[in-house]
Image: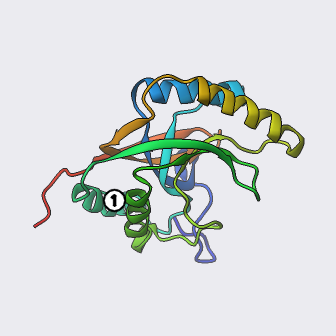
Amino acid sequence: MIDENGRPSPIQAGGGLNVFALVIYIPGPLGCFLDDLRRELVPHYNPHAHVSVLPPRPLAVDWQIASDQVRALTGGWTPFDIELAGLQVFPVTDVIYLEIGAGAADLRSMHAAMNSGPLEFEEPFSYHPHITLAQEVSNEGVQAMRDLAHRRWTEYQGSRTFRAERAVFVQNTMTDCWVDLAEYSLGAFTVK
């Protein structure tokens, strides 16, 4: 939606914000572990573990138009494995996250292909594939939270790899809850 100044409107009809993202959810025991860890680190948060292909952004068009672009691009994208590596902290924002090992190059390529046309957005930070564990933490609390997250991640005995087979287009709401709008299967059709 466009406001009277020709810019994307921040609020849409129905209580949704004009803030959208494209994510790959982390399935199975690994996803459950990460959700539990995030709730332990940030108790008021209701997580759904994911890696963002397109970080949150406003749209200047109806979301279905952007969805058509996502569907066209994901349909020709071959599924790939994503491996979670070590725990890190972004220095400027103090976001505690898990680094992506294998699959990072695929995610960067996917992001570059998707961040165009109706989905194009000049992001405040360079795209860096990762799994957020905690954000908006007080500066004083970052080290203790990082240490706890590191300890839990070290204790985790399950697989640290998952298959990226689906992407989900999501929208933020006025209650800061993300709603799934559409799901896309990677490799849904063969590119000739």
Decide if residue 142 is on the left or right side of residue 189.
right
Q: Residue at x 10, y 67 (%)?
A: 192
Q: Label 1 amino acid?
A: Val
Q: Residue at x 50, y 64 (%)?
A: 59
Image quadrant in which you'd find residue 132: top right
Q: Residue at x 49, y 53 (%)?
A: 21
Mark 1 surroundings: few (<14), some (14-19) or many (≥20) residues within 10 A: many
Decide if residue 98 is on the left or right side of residue 73.
right
In the rendered image, the residue lying farthest to the bottom is 6
> What percent of the width, then of the height, locates residue 101?
47, 49
In the rendered image, the residue lying farthest to the right is 140
Q: Nearer the viewer, residue 22 or 158?
A: 158
Q: Nearer the viewer, residue 19 or 70?
A: 70
Mark 1 element type: helix
Q: Residue at x 40, y 26 (%)?
A: 28
> What percent of the width, then of the height, locates residue 55?
54, 56
> What percent of the width, then of the height, locates residue 142?
81, 41
Q: Which residue matches tag 1?
A: 70
Q: Nearer the viewer, residue 51 or 67?
A: 51
Image quadrant in which you'd find residue 92: bottom right
| 160 over 130 or under it: above or below | above
